[in-house]
Amino acid sequence: MDNCYLCGNVFDTDKVKRHDEHIIQQAIGGVISDKNILCFSCGEYLGREVDVSFNEIFHSISTRLDIKKDRKLNKKSAIKGILQSKIDQFGVDLGEIEVLWKDFKVTPVVPMHHYVNDNSKVIIYAMKKQAKTYAKKVERESKFKDNKPEMVFCDDIEGLVSYPFKLDGGAFKKGLAKIAIGFASYLGIKREDVPLVLDIKTDNSAEIRRNIQLIQYFPLGALDPRLEELKPEVGYFPTHTLIIFTSLSNPSLLVCYIELFSTFQWYVILNDKYQGDPIYEYFYQRLLKSDDYNFEPGRKYYKERQGILSYLGISDNRINDAYEKQKNNNDAKSIEYVEIEIVKEEHIKKKYRVDFEQEIDNSLSVFTTEVIKKGFSSIENACDIKKGVDLFYDYNTDREQFKILNYKRCYVSNGEYQDYIYSLMTLSGSDKLRNYSFSKFNQLTAFTEMEGIKRKLEA
Ligand SMILES: [Zn+2]
């Protein structure tokens, strides 16, 4: 794009500078960015107006998953929670006290102590740096003086903790709208083509709409409920997914599916009078750090340069164009630098692409194996499963080929193809939805707890 989607101004190197905009907020682990969708001042503005409160919603999740880019900052972050377990590792019932999560350790907000084993031991619950001062206070207690119990320090309570998660409706909606507009712009969809999320004024500036149409995802059909359950077991977890597609039954309906942390799953309606060609484009990323996603051009790169470029689908023209576009800027980069930036970008995209389709393919295999073992519950069920699986494979080629194009777009019910969007429009607000959100959230919480334990074992 040549202009900023918000103010509408055309980019230049002087007044309307380009902003390196993260499509999914960086604070929640987003990795793709685009320099051609927002100008510097609009990027900064939306950062303050939208991102700050949106990121705050996910703060307790991002911090505990340790996905923030600035890990030093993460170490300083603490989150308050409420202890849920009845007894801890010392057999003490601390009750539903307020606790602090910091750097994978859980301590009470206010230091405390408990006598155990007929007062022969006293457990001091406190963060390391508070422990000594607090212990001195305990030593002055008459109960302590009488028995001289053994002192045990605990700076990490073992047990279940619930952390706050407040879904602030306004901030959440705005954040999702911004992700959707950003992703659409990234794909080259014009700002005029997303009128249900972006309100373009007569002076050509625009505003992100407050009242956007959000539809919560709920798995339907014979396959999808199980595929959702399998997510933490098959493939990477948690992940962020974005899909922009036109509805199969109505190509003038343009929709963005947003899934954050494999948990928060929503459709945002972008346009109900879309004129462009039918589309299905996705972006997918995992959240936990992995070294094989880094690409460093070494000697090997220069030796195999041509092969790598053609594998990644990068033409010399694209490199030259990108170079030409910026060569007169004050901060112009060398052509070698521009090339490596493109290679890095495509390398990551390719990895994600492989991962995503592979994962869905794998979940389907796990699912069909299960079904074969258990058998079908009815003939209708068998038909739906067969037809549902067929949505993901192309049998017209020599060997069956996985095809992604129906994921989160269609499902099969009573032998018929159904459009997710239209089915879900009538489902919102039901108990089923609430229970599903709850189970999704539990899935993420259970995973986060396990990650914390793993981290401690590694330390
Ligand atoms: Zn702007």
Image (tube, helix red, strand yellow):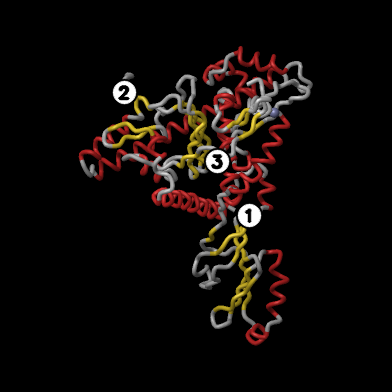
**Dot 2 crowding, Cα within 10 Å, few <14, some 14–19, many 20+:** few
Outermost residue on the left side: it is 379
Compared across the picture, whether 414 is left or right of 328 comes to left
The residue at 36%/43% (across/down) is 226
**Sequence-first tag of 1 and 2:** 1
Q: Marks 1 and 2, how far apart in space?
A: 50 Å
Give 170 or 75, whichever is nearer the viewer.
170
Outermost residue on the bottom side: it is 146
Compared across the picture, whether 136 is left or right of 188 comes to right
**Dot 3 crowding, Cα within 10 Å, few <14, some 14–19, many 20+:** many
Q: Marks 3 and 2, how far apart in space?
A: 33 Å
The residue at 35%/35% (across/down) is 411
Residue type, mark 3 in image: Leu
Compared across the picture, whether 355 is left or right of 38 comes to left
Residue 129, above or below 421: below
Residue type, mark 2 in image: Tyr
Q: Are marks 1 and 2 in contact (CB under 8 Å)?
A: no
Q: What residue did someone put label 3 on?
A: 287
Residue type, mark 1 in image: Asp
Q: What residue did someone put label 2 on?
A: 395
**Sequence-first tag of 3 and 2:** 3
Among the 4 quarters of the image, the one containing residue 302: top right
Q: What residue did someone put label 1 on?
A: 103
Q: Are marks 3 and 1 in contact (CB under 8 Å)?
A: no
In terms of secondary structure, where does tag 1 sit?
loop
Residue 22 screen position, x and y as percent: 63, 34
Quarter holding ligand 1: top right
In terms of secondary structure, where does tag 2 sit?
loop
Residue 407 screen position, x and y as percent: 41, 33
Q: Marks 3 and 1, how far apart in space?
A: 18 Å
**Dot 1 crowding, Cα within 10 Å, few <14, some 14–19, many 20+:** some
